[in-house]
Image: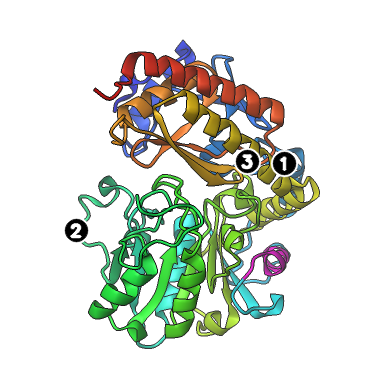
Amino acid sequence: MSHHEFVFRGEKSRELAQRDTRTLSPSYTRSYGFAISHGQGAEVWDVDGNRYVDFAAGIAVLSTGYSHPRVVQAIQEQATRYIHIGATDFFCPEPIKLAEKLQQIIPIHRARPEDKRVYFANSGTEAIESALKLARYREHRSHLIAFYGGFHGRTMGSLSLTASKSKQRGGYPYIPGGVTHVPYPARNECGDCHDGESCCSQCWSDAVGFIEKFVFKKVPPQEVAAVVVEPIQGEGGYLVPRDDFFPRLRQMCDKYGILLIADEIQSGVGRTGQWTALEHWGVSADIVCLAKGLGSGVPIGAMVAHNNVMRLWSPGTHASTFGGNPLACAAALATLDIIEEENLMPRADELGRLTMDRLHRFMQDHPSVRRVDGKGFMIGIDFASASGEPLPDFRDEVVNRCYLNGLLLLGCGTGGVRFAPPLVLTRSLLEEGLDILEHVIAEVEETMWQPAS
């Protein structure tokens, strides 16, 4: 889509989009004509002076909101001392402090805090790349298992795992192999499954059974390095798995000596009301990848792993010039302190439940709303026809009109939108944004909804 097809709320935004077209890559996936001027908390203003409630948080990044004073202060203070030293070659206090913090708060399977080790990267996809290299560094284990609908990044290694949209993989003929994809066991996908009940063992949404019955006919389990999974699928639609999935997956991985890698890049750092989303199922991974909300907008990624795995690496086997950058680590330390001290995880849990209640009421009044599911401040809303088919055009119209009415939303999946606001979102802003969303859904239903004939 070219910029002239976007909807805009002012001429300054339109002019900025035209300059963007002349200078930046056409590969970016802009949805509408929002052009930022400044933000505060969970509110943001465009260059034309229009105000918005933000339900997107820069793709689930701005955990502490826009320019939280303590994050700004931490960045400023660090910048006055030094901005970069190269933590690969020299010892540096900031990444050490941040790693010590992550040792305390990120659960790793069968690990005490002192048993964990941390590798710092600059993004989520880099964190995934490092996890893949580490998992495959074990002798005779090179194969990976991932899930359809999963999104793990766009660099070539992480792209071998990504399977949320064919557009992301199309046109790249040399994506690394050694990856088998299986269906993700979303609890809403199987018509025979009901909340609180186990599905039949033969159903395709029994992912663990699928792996053991079919995948291990192709690849011996002793050659599988890891299973890589998002606890809640993000780009694939904000899908929550069956409740029995992760306990059984953990059991299977332990049985065959396979590492469990949790991609918590979107779901971690308090977004679901816990430091990691896996905690909702009482399960921990061998390797956890973090990014997005970790730095409140400053680029940083992290891989946390059990030392039994990490110690296989020796100096030079993997590193990054900017990984563990002191400025980014200072922002991340401030972010984690704010999340704890301002009780943002309990807030996400409480307001997330209120949001789910309100959205389920939407379903009663609006036939286009087919699914609402999630945890904390990570909730997906699907639009579907009377026959159950996804409605991507309907979704796009909802997203555009929300923008025109002062609400920032992002799509996900085939016909859904995601609720992923800053963790500092207040109840009054939550209600304001949900009012806008419901008003827009009603408007779009008047012109685009087709009832069953």
Residue 107 in which image quadrant: bottom right
Residue 83: image location, x then y, percent: 66, 53
Between 107 and 351, the one lying in front of the other is 351
Report helix, strand or loop for mark 1.
helix
- Disc with the residue nearer the chain's start (2 vs 3): 2
Q: Which mark is residue 42?
A: none
**Magenta residues (range):** 95-107
Residue 231: image location, x then y, percent: 50, 58
Report helix, strand or loop for mark 3.
helix
Colour scheme shown: rainbow
Between 134 and 110, the one lying in front of the other is 110
The residue carrying pointer 3 sits among few (fewer than 14), some (14 to 19) or many (20 or more) residues within 10 Å by Cα, namely many
The quadrant of the rendering that contains the C terminus is top left
Mark 2–mark 1 Cα distance, whole angstroms, equals 43 Å
The residue carrying pointer 1 sits among few (fewer than 14), some (14 to 19) or many (20 or more) residues within 10 Å by Cα, namely some
Q: Amino acid at mark 3?
A: Gly
Residue 127: image location, x then y, percent: 49, 62
Q: Which residue in the structure is indicated by mark 3?
A: 352
Between 279 and 138, the one lying in front of the other is 279
Mark 2–mark 3 Cα distance, whole angstroms, equals 41 Å
Q: Which residue in the structure is indicated by mark 2?
A: 173
- Mark 3 vs mark 1: in front: 3
The residue carrying pointer 2 sits among few (fewer than 14), some (14 to 19) or many (20 or more) residues within 10 Å by Cα, namely few
Q: Is residue 377 above or below residue 16?
A: below
- Mark 2 vs mark 3: in front: 3
Is the magenta region chiefly helix, strand or loop? Answer: helix
Residue name at image x 39 percent, y 88 percent? 139
Residue 229 relative to residue 351: left or right = left
Q: Is residue 113 above or below residue 412?
A: below
Q: Amino acid at mark 1?
A: Val
Q: Which residue in the structure is indicated by mark 1?
A: 72
